[in-house]
Image: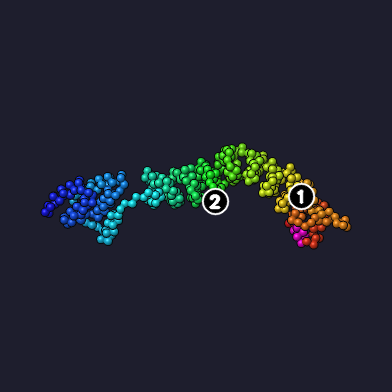
Amino acid sequence: MGGDNAQRARFAIDATHGLAVDAVLDIVRAMADASHKTVSDPLVRMLSKLAQHAEQGTAEARPQADEALREQVRALLEGWTLDDPNPDAYGLALHRMAAASPVHSTQPGQQATEPLRIVQTALETGALGFGAWRAIERLVAEQHVGDLVELLGSPAGGTDIGPLWTRITSPDVVRQLASIEPPDFTTLDRVLPRLPVDAFEPLLDVLGASESRTTRRGLLDRLTRAPRELGPVIATRLTHAIPWYVTRNLLLILDGLPALPDGFRAATFIAHEDARVRREAFKVALKVPAERERALLGALRDADRRTVRLGLTAALEECPASVLAVVAELARHPGTASELRVLAIKVLGRVKNTGALNALLQLVDGGTNWLGRQKLATRSLELLAALMALAAGWRNDMRAAALLALAAASNDPDVRNAASGAIKR
């Protein structure tokens, strides 16, 4: 151009209309060298990045980047006055970064830091606007709810984070946390105290559908800490046709709630064919005063040993007179498991009733020896338990006192301790 700056400017402007983007950049650099002027390095890096996107970007980005590049070059031709403020090494590194090809991520969740930083900035500045909510939704969609909850654990200067907690504890987010295998129990534990009643329903859904025992166990542990308002929801689900293990789990959750829903009756499930369901049904029924006595009788007569143990344990707290005969029969019957007989004897020992006394005397009395003298029954765990029960509650009864005296004179130290230890106590 023979040193004519006006011609150079016209040529460069024409180039922005007709030449390829890389040629436009080359002309800008050559024009800067010929004019002995400095082009702003940040601007050159921006133009280089625009050129990369104009040639290699997505179909949507290419025309926009091309147009933006040409507009910036035309604006640049008005004159250069800025000296380069960057050190040479730093500028070279930035040039290399700007010349790198654009990377298009197709996998969700690879860049959670950026939306998280947006949310953090919004919370710190108290400006939870559209951009922040868009970042929040991205974090939720890319399964970074745990990072979001962690962020909310630190104080956020005066910002009202109630709406954000409402979003995090919504049913769809809770379902997302519970549906992955294994569930995100760490995050669930942090949001559990804030969950509304409707957000517990996804946990119930996953509990009923999951094939993993570990998942079901973890959800059960957390659902038993649910508020009492969940009771009616569970009672409604129990009216549907569901597998036995779902019924058992729902009854277990119901038993762990602070209170049972009004009007709930467990009688339907006490007759269930599966012993595990019956056992949980008895636990619930024993909490209902109107059902307790009937449930206690049913549990003590059940064929399942664990259910009988449940009934005897409940009878230790309170044993109605109508139940006493069944308890005594369990204590005396040789076919009853030893652990259950001992537990039944403990129940008899707490009941101040003549029927209980007679049952205990029968267990201790071994009849007479060949000299016609009274003797104790054969040594057993049941005998020791009965002696302790007599000593604790009936030592003033003549028949009990006679048997306790025999025990105190026994050569067996366990028999002596069963009587004397209980008397001291």
Residue 74, horizontal then vertical, whole percent? 20, 47
| C-alpha span from label 1 to label 2 | 42 Å
Left or right: where does residue 253 sit relative to residue 129? Answer: right
Q: Is 378 placed above or below 229 here?
A: below
Which of the marked residues, 1 or 2, is nearer the chain's N terminus? 2
| Main SS of residues in magenta | helix
| Labels 1, 2: front one | 2
* Res 71 visible: yes
Residue ID at (68%, 49%): 305
Tell me the amino acid under the disc marked 1: Arg
- Asked whether the residues under the numbered discs 1 and 2 touch, taking CB atoms below 8 Å apart as contact, a structural biologist would say no
Extent of the magenta region: 413-421
Q: How is the image coloured?
A: rainbow
* Residue ID for mark 2: 214
- Whether residue 81 is visible here, answered yes or no, is no
In this picture, residue 168 sits left or right of residue 341:
left
Quick one: label 1, few (<14), some, or many (20+) residues within 10 Å? Answer: some
Q: Which residue is mark 1?
A: 332
Q: Which mark is residue 178?
A: none
Q: Is residue 36 above or below residue 236?
A: below
Please give the name of the residue rendered at 16% of the width and 55% of the height, measured from the top-left corner. 35
**x then y, percent, for residue 400:** 80, 53
Q: Residue at x 17, y 53 (%)?
A: 31
At a point 58% along the width and 43% down the height, the residue shown is 246
Secondary-structure class at tag 2: helix
Q: Is residue 230 above or below residue 80?
A: above
Q: Secondary structure at mark 1?
A: helix
Q: Quadrant of the C terminus?
A: bottom right
Nearest to the observer: residue 404 or residue 364 = 364
Question: Residue 148: horizontal and vertical position, in percent?
Answer: 43, 49
Q: Which image quadrant for residue 85?
A: bottom left
Dot 2 crowding, Cα within 10 Å, few <14, some 14–19, many 20+: few
